[in-house]
Amino acid sequence: MNPVVLFGASRGLGFEVARYFREQGVEVYSMVRKPESAAALEDMGVNVILGDALDQESINSLLDSTPDNAVAVSTMGSFQAEIPVDYLGHRLVIDELEQRNIRRFVMVTSLGCGDSWAYLSDKAKAVFGKAVREKSLAESWLSTSQLDYTILRPGGLQDGEVSEQGKLSQNCEVHGLITRAEVARLIYQVLNDEKTVGQIYACVDPEFTSRFKR
């Protein structure tokens, strides 16, 4: 696979994506704000620079260091962030990618974004609604860009291993859970499938969800 430039790699899902892609022998480039986050990624062989996704110069520095044949992946979110990055950060990244030779972009948002908003419970809307709306704006910006995009909307993210059981679905109501490692595998899968360009998928792991309910 082509090298990957990864936004949002410092923790959580992004860290698992970096780990999975490195295990597949893929060259990974990323940007983090904190030196302590950089150390863990560098230990697994990720090419890291320090910067902020809300800063245009930082984005430029990362992309300047990335091979022209790279593809892009973003798992950026606003957990514990003073300024939400979900929309503004993605807008800066998308706009810059459009000016370069990096055309392929997989963005991870969440269930409830876009046309799946109606499927969120009132409780979820109250707790996560603002973040979901920010992510929905990012989806809209991406889907109207010139990039060859795929959007993944995972269910509740859990710790755990790759299961090979994660399912991609479209145009239906979806609820459930999935491990971060399994989402990483699905990202790898869609990047290797040209038929996923221009598509939006929900993704959950039915087997994990059923085990969780027992």
Image (cartoon, helix red, strand yellow):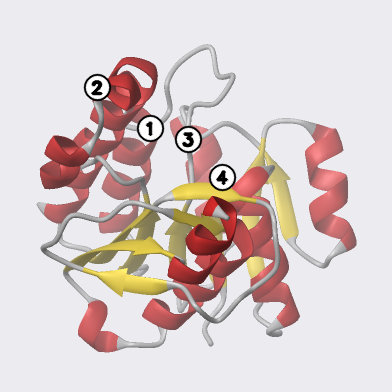
Amino acid marked by disc 1: Asp
Give the residue displayed 15% in from the left and 54% down from the top. 143
Q: In this rendering, which labeled residue sits more in front, label 2 or label 4?
A: 2
Vertically, is 94 above or below 170? above
- Residue 82 appears at what percent x and percent y? 53, 12
The residue at which mark 1 appears reads as: 86
Quadrant (top left, top right, bottom left, bottom right) of the C terminus: bottom right
- Residue 84 appears at what percent x and percent y? 42, 21
Element marked by disc 2:
helix
- Residue 43 appears at what percent x and percent y? 89, 60
Give the residue displayed 17% in from the left and 45% down from the top. 116
Which of the labelled discs sits on residue 77, or is there none? Answer: 3
Q: Nearer the viewer, residue 162 or 81?
A: 162
Q: Nearer the viewer, residue 195 or 61?
A: 195
Element marked by disc 3:
loop
The residue at which mark 4 appears reads as: 8
Determine contact: label 2, label 3, CB under 8 Å: no
The residue at which mark 2 appears reads as: 122
Q: Nearer the viewer, residue 213 or 170?
A: 213
Query: Dot 4: within a 10 Å radius of its alpha carbon, few (fewer than 14), some, or many (20 or more) residues?
Result: many
Calculate the distance from the C-alpha at mark 3 to the C-alpha at mark 4. Answer: 7 Å
Query: Dot 1: within a 10 Å radius of its alpha carbon, few (fewer than 14), some, or many (20 or more) residues?
Result: many
Determine contact: label 3, label 4, CB under 8 Å: yes
Calculate the distance from the C-alpha at mark 1 to the C-alpha at mark 2. Answer: 21 Å
Determine contact: label 3, label 1, CB under 8 Å: yes
